[in-house]
Image (cartoon, rainbow, N blue to C red):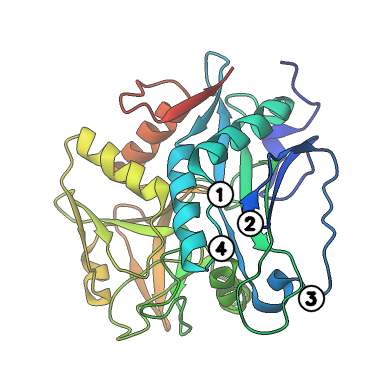
Amino acid sequence: MEKKNIDWSNLGFGYMATDKRYVANYTDGAWDEGGLVDDPNITMNECAGVLQYAQTVFEGLKAYTTEDGRTVMFRPDLNASRLADSARRLEMPVFPEDRFIDAVYQTVKANEAYVPPCGSGATLYIRPYMFGINPVIGVKPADDYQFRIFTTPVGPYFKGGAKPITIKVSDFDRAAPHGTGNIKAGLNYAMSLHAIVTAHAEGFDENMYLDAGTRTYVEETGGANFLFVDKDGKVVIPKSDSILPSITRRSLTQVAKDLGLEVEERKVAFSEVPEFVECGLCGTAAVISPVGCVNDHGKDIVFKNGCDEMGPVIKKLYDTLTGIQMGRLEDKHDWLYEIK
């Protein structure tokens, strides 16, 4: 497969239209057969449910070129099941999980020329999403829905790549107890926009959100889960009912266990954060971004083993997971789906 003539190494994390996208429609209580289309634009009524009441859910995953030239996707089965959970929570019809995987496969196959070459530092980002499309003026779920997938080649999520970032403790809340923080709904990300713009204006890369109920426990950032390392090398992962179940975090948890590291998933009090020696943000977009410093209202909490460069434990996790994704290391858990 001949690749497109793109400056892969200088790509940012932005949108670039590719050749094909997938579309399926839900009407009269059933999904149609769906298929690939050329047009990147969507036509809908001015009163569409998604525009009035934000009834939309989405996913994010990636396709890679391995060192031996294969095109692979990473764990799309988990994205399929998470989208189904999100849809149920927002009273939307579930797009069948087997069809989700097939639709992602079709979309990547049709846009394979946009999958960046191995070693370029870029990947093909895949965005499946679903939304209420028929007119809705009373507050209720829509009747008709559209499921779509587009792809776009992207570079690193944070401009510094693997350079440690600086984040701040936010005074805003990301998700309410018993709310929608544990699903991938568009409304959760709208909640974080003012907070992230504020953080950027103050010179920070991201926010650390605390639990909305007590503001004493670490939750996540606007788009990634936290991972900490203590002085004994144990990986500590915050646990909460309002944290999104990141597929990257779940994969890193398994990788850590495979490497013989002790892993503990539990509630993490903010008061413990100064005791950790490494910190990372994990998610599809960033894989793991090291955090060098957390600013708590003017007071810096510095992670001594990861202040200036990625700490040794997080680097080992990063190298192992990306090694699996790029085909350098054995895929012992069958996480890769090859595009043939």
CB within 8 Å, label 4 to label 2:
yes
Distance of label 3 from label 1 (alpha carbons): 23 Å
Q: Residue furthest top?
A: 68
Q: Amino acid at mark 1?
A: Phe
Query: What quarter of the picture does the N terminus occupy?
Result: top right
Is the residue under label 1 in contact with that under label 2 (CB below 8 Å)?
yes
Residue 7 visible in the shown view: yes
The residue under label 1 is 95
Relative to 4, 202 lies left or right: left
Q: Secondary structure at mark 1?
A: loop
Q: Is residue 249 left or right of residue 94?
A: left
User: Which comes before the other along the chain, label 2 or label 1?
Assistant: 1
Quick check: marks 3 and 1 in contact, CB under 8 Å?
no
Could you give the CA–CA distance between mark 4 and mark 3, rounded to whole angstroms?
17 Å
Give the amino acid type for the residue marked by disc 3 in the picture. Cys
Q: Amino acid at mark 4?
A: Met
Residue at 81 percent across and 26 percent down: it is 5
**Residue of label 4:** 92
Q: Identify residue for label 3.
A: 47
Task: Report the residue marked by disc 2.
Answer: 130
Classify mark 4: helix, strand or loop.
Answer: loop
**Label 3 crowding class (10 Å Cα cut-off): few <14, some 14-19, many 20+?**
some
